[in-house]
Image: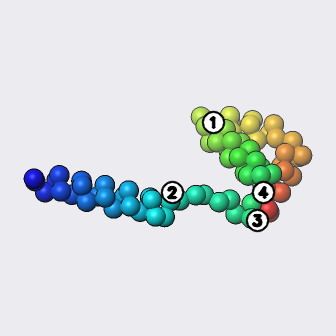
Amino acid sequence: MDIDTQWQQIKEMWTSTCSEVLGKKKYRQKDWISADILNKVQVRKEKKGAIKNGRTRAARRVHRGKQSSQEQRKNRQGKLH
């Protein structure tokens, strides 16, 4: 038996034992983050991505100009929460 085979066996043994004893790590959403806030963050990321994808300064200005004041308020709310 070579060293690589031994290492794989030891690694498999530890991995399987740990997963049996401890179980898989489960992600739990933080209490202070609601689904509404996550949606606001996602919308904001998409809008920022659209602005970044503009190829010229003029295209970015046009895109920013299209944002209504209501959308700007929503963005500010997303930043504050």
Query: Callout 1 environment at 10 Å: few (<14), some (14 to 19), or many (20+)?
Result: some
Q: Name the amino acid, label 1.
A: Gly
| In this view, the mark in front (4 or 1) | 4
- Distance, label 4 to label 3, CA atoms, is 6 Å
CB atoms of marks 2 and 1 within 8 Å: no
Instruction: Judge left or right: residue 49 versus residue 24.
Output: right
CB atoms of marks 4 and 3 within 8 Å: yes
Q: Secondary structure at mark 1?
A: loop
19 over 39 or under it: above or below: below
Residue extending farthest to the right is 70
Q: Earlier in the sequence, mark 4 or mark 2?
A: 2
Say which mark, if any, is on residue 77.
none
Q: What residue would you read off at disc 2?
A: 24
Q: Residue at x 68, y 59 (%)?
A: 29
Q: What residue would you read off at disc 1?
A: 54
- Distance, label 3 to label 2, CA atoms, is 24 Å
Q: Position of residue 35 (x, y in %)?
A: 77, 52
| In this view, the mark in front (2 or 1) | 2
Q: Position of residue 32 (x, y in %)?
A: 76, 65
Q: What residue would you read off at disc 3?
A: 32
Q: Residue at x 44, y 58 (%)?
A: 19
- Distance, label 1 to label 3, CA atoms, is 34 Å
Q: Name the amino acid, label 2.
A: Lys
Q: Earlier in the sequence, mark 2 or mark 1?
A: 2
Instruction: Judge left or right: residue 21 versus residue 35.
Output: left
Any part of residue 44 in sight: no
Q: Name the amino acid, label 3.
A: Trp
Q: Position of residue 16 (x, y in %)?
A: 38, 56
